[in-house]
């Protein structure tokens, strides 16, 4: 009886310590911890996506609808891309890797990425069409200056990243 209580308490202690260590690590690299099921991050949910543009309520509603539509289009492509990545990884670690199959899988992944990029660019053009001239100037300055946005993005002090879109 004592041994079973002792083993149970040791097991619970180990589980608590390991789960604390896992949660303390958080997400790294691609900041997926702040994303919900639609792939949108918490900045979007807080309505700060384009706060710098001072959108009207009508514009804001239209822009949010465009981004929701984009997310609905991108999610299946993201899942497909992840599936292709897993397949590529399996092909790469095979005992006798098939170079042709690997290259074909890489081509399939490139096609998906290209389609995703086209959807994003189309969405950007649709959003831009909703803006007035002053908002377009701000939008263009912000979106065209994003080439290295991941390197320069900083936390805003709350542990959240700045919402720059």
Image (cartoon, helix red, strand yellow):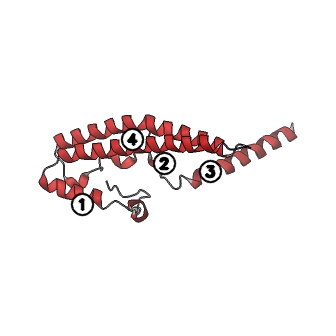
Q: Which residue is at 39% across, 41% downward?
A: 115
Q: Which residue is mark 1?
A: 141
- Asked which quadrant contains residue 61, the reply is top left
The alpha-carbon separation of the residues under discs 1 and 3 comes to 40 Å
Label 2 vs label 3, nearer the camera: 2
Residue depicted at 31% across the width and 41% down the height: 67
Residue visible at 28% across and 43% down in the picture? 122
* Crowding near the residue tagged with mark 3, few <14, some 14–19, many ≥20 C-alpha atoms within 10 Å: few
Element under disc 3 = helix
Whichever of labels 4 and 2 marks the residue nearer the N terminus, that label is 2
- Packing grade of label 2 (10 A; few <14, some 14-19, many >=20) is few
Looking at the rendered image, the disc whose residue lies closer to the viewer, 1 or 4, is 4
- Alpha carbon of mark 2 to alpha carbon of mark 1: how far? 26 Å
Estimate the spatial distance between the alpha carbons at disc 4 and disc 2, rounded to whole Å.
22 Å
Q: Quadrant of the N terminus?
A: top right
**According to the image, label 3 marks what residue?**
22
Residue occupying image coordinates x 34% and y 55%: 163
Residue bearing the label numbered 2: 32
Q: Nearer the viewer, mark 1 or mark 3?
A: 1
Choose between 106 and 61: the one closer to the eye.
106
């Amino acid at each position: 009886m004592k041994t079973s209580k002792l083993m149970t308490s040791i097991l619970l202690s180990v589980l608590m310590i390991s789960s604390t260590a896992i949660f303390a690590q958080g997400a790294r690299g691609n900041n997926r911890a702040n994303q919900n099921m639609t792939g949108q991050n918490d900045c979007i949910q807080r309505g700060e996506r384009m706060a710098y543009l001072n959108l009207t309520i009508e514009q804001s509603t239209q822009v949010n609808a465009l981004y929701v539509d984009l997310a609905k289009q991108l999610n299946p492509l993201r899942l497909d891309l992840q599936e292709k990545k897993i397949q590529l990884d399996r092909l790469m670690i095979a005992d006798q890797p098939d170079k042709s199959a690997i290259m074909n899988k890489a081509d399939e992944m490139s096609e998906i990425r290209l389609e995703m990029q086209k959807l994003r660019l189309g969405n950007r053009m649709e959003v831009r069409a909703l803006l007035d001239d002053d908002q377009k100037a701000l939008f263009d300055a912000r979106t065209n200056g994003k080439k290295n946005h991941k390197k320069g993005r900083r936390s805003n002090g709350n542990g959240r990243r700045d919402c720059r879109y």
